[in-house]
Image (cartoon, rainbow, N blue to C red):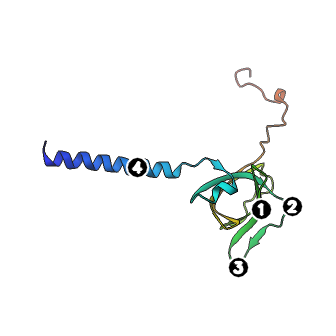
Amino acid sequence: MKPKLIIGIVAIIGFTSLLMYNFGESISTYTTFEAASDMSNAHVAGTWDDSQNYGFSMESKTFTFYMKDENGDSRRVVYPKPKPNNFEQADRLVVIGEMRGETFYANDMLMKCPSKYNDADPSQFVNASES
């Protein structure tokens, strides 16, 4: 075989291996706060713990709140952005980040808000093919 072909095959294998490694690192399943302490990038799903204080700090420019994970463990979450508009209405939160001690530092946050169609009467909706 020619040296250029061998170098090309090795480069393709190396690039594919690197891609698969990075893809595997970026995929994360939902976890709990306890398990997140061993991870560098965790996705923790839960609900807002409205029995605890929350708010935005102008000094540190962070939004801080408490969240209960799926096991009911409540931890402080620090989010480096302002409070989302529909935060209080969210049914479920997913925070993405890492645990440092007893505090979870979120880089991103996803919210599942209740649908306005959940309690709607199905007879209110007309099938487009019937009209």
Residue 47 horizontal/vertical position (percent): 77, 52
Secondary element type, mark 2: loop
Q: Is residue 130 above or below residue 29?
A: above
Q: How many marks?
A: 4
> Which element carries disc 3, helix, strand or loop?
loop
Q: Which mark is residue 59?
A: 3
- In percent of the image, x 69 and y 70: which residue is there? 62
**Quarter location, residue 33:** bottom right
Which image quadrant: the C terminus? top right
- Marks 1/3 in contact by CB < 8 Å: the verdict is no
State how far apart marks 1 and 3 are (Cα): 19 Å
Q: Earlier in the sequence, mark 2 or mark 1?
A: 2
Other-residue count near label 1 (Cα within 10 Å), few / some / many at <14 / 14–19 / ≥20: many
Q: Is label 3 or label 2 in front?
A: 2
Residue pictured at 66% horizontal, 50% vertical: 31
Q: Amino acid at mark 4?
A: Leu
For mark 2, what is the residue? 51
Which amino acid does the dot numbered 1 rest on? Tyr
> Outermost residue toward the top?
130
Whether residue 96 is visible, yes or no, is no
**Which x, y percent locates residue 2?**
13, 45
Residue position for label 4: 19
Q: How crowded is the residue under tag 2: few (<14 C-alpha within 10 Å), some, or many (20+)?
A: few
Give the Cα separation between the discs numbered 2 and 1. Answer: 9 Å
Contact? badges 2 and 1 (CB < 8 Å): yes
- Amino acid under disc 3: Glu
Where residue 29 sits in the image (x, y, percent)?
61, 47
Q: Within the image, what quadrant is residue 73 found in? A: bottom right
Q: Which mark is residue 66?
A: 1
Q: Is residue 63 left or right of residue 43?
A: right
